[in-house]
């Protein structure tokens, strides 16, 4: 299981790097748009590109954030509970997240195929929309597996971060 855990740790790190490059791309496109507007030639489609990159940044940063416990958690009350209750709450919360994230991944694939079938494209640049929805599906699938790995670690190593 340690090799399996390392594989998804590395995959989460790759997803994080994709998110980082998306944020850098957002900054570059925004700066280029400002410069182009100052010289009188607006960057057509800049808002679409920034929107797509924002979706990539948000979706692909989730698995690494979960793995590093970088999300917001309010556990002041939970820490006062006995260790077994804490563990049960943590596992039940993660099981709910697994169901939710798996459902999002599956529905995203379904929606992407629907967008591909009808030929949905962005308004200004005419980019097809389905690859971005498929990317979000991949990111939620990775997140689902990272959460399952966390549940496994709770059962076998008795650790809760």
Image: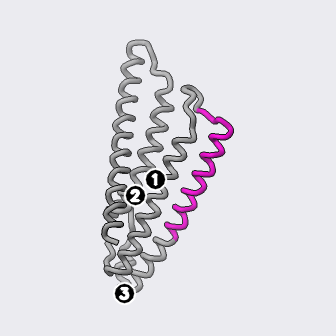
Q: Quadrant of the C terminus?
A: bottom left
Q: Residues within 10 Å of mark 3 (few under 14, many from 20)?
A: few
Relative image position of residue 120 (x, y in whole percent): 63, 36
Residue that badge 1 annotates: 139
Using the image, determine if residue 111 lies above or below residue 1. above
Report the coloring of the rendering: one colour
Viewer-side residue, 21 vs 79? 21
Q: Nearer the viewer, mark 2 or mark 3?
A: 2
- The quadrant holding residue 99 is bottom right
- Marks 1/2 in contact by CB < 8 Å: the verdict is yes
How many numbered tags mark residues here? 3
Residue plotted at (38% across, 13% down): 39
Q: Nearer the viewer, mark 1 or mark 3?
A: 1
Residue 82, label in figure:
3
Q: Is residue 105 left or right of residue 10?
A: right
Residue that badge 2 annotates: 63
């Amino acid at each position: 299981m340690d090799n399996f855990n390392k594989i998804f740790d590395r995959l989460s790190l790759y997803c994080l790097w994709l998110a980082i490059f998306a944020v850098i791309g957002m900054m570059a496109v925004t700066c280029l748009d400002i410069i182009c507007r100052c010289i009188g030639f607006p960057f057509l489609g800049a808002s679409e590109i920034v929107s797509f990159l924002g979706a990539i940044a948000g979706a692909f940063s989730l698995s690494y954030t979960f793995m590093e416990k970088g999300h917001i958690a309010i556990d002041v009350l939970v820490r006062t509970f006995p260790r077994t209750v804490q563990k049960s709450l943590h596992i039940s919360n993660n099981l709910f997240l697994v169901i939710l994230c798996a459902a999002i991944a599956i529905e995203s694939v379904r929606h992407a195929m629907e967008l591909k079938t009808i030929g949905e494209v962005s308004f200004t640049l005419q980019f097809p929309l389905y690859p971005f929805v498929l990317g979000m599906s991949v990111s939620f699938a990775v997140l689902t597996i990272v959460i399952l790995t966390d549940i496994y670690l709770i059962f076998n190593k008795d650790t809760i971060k």
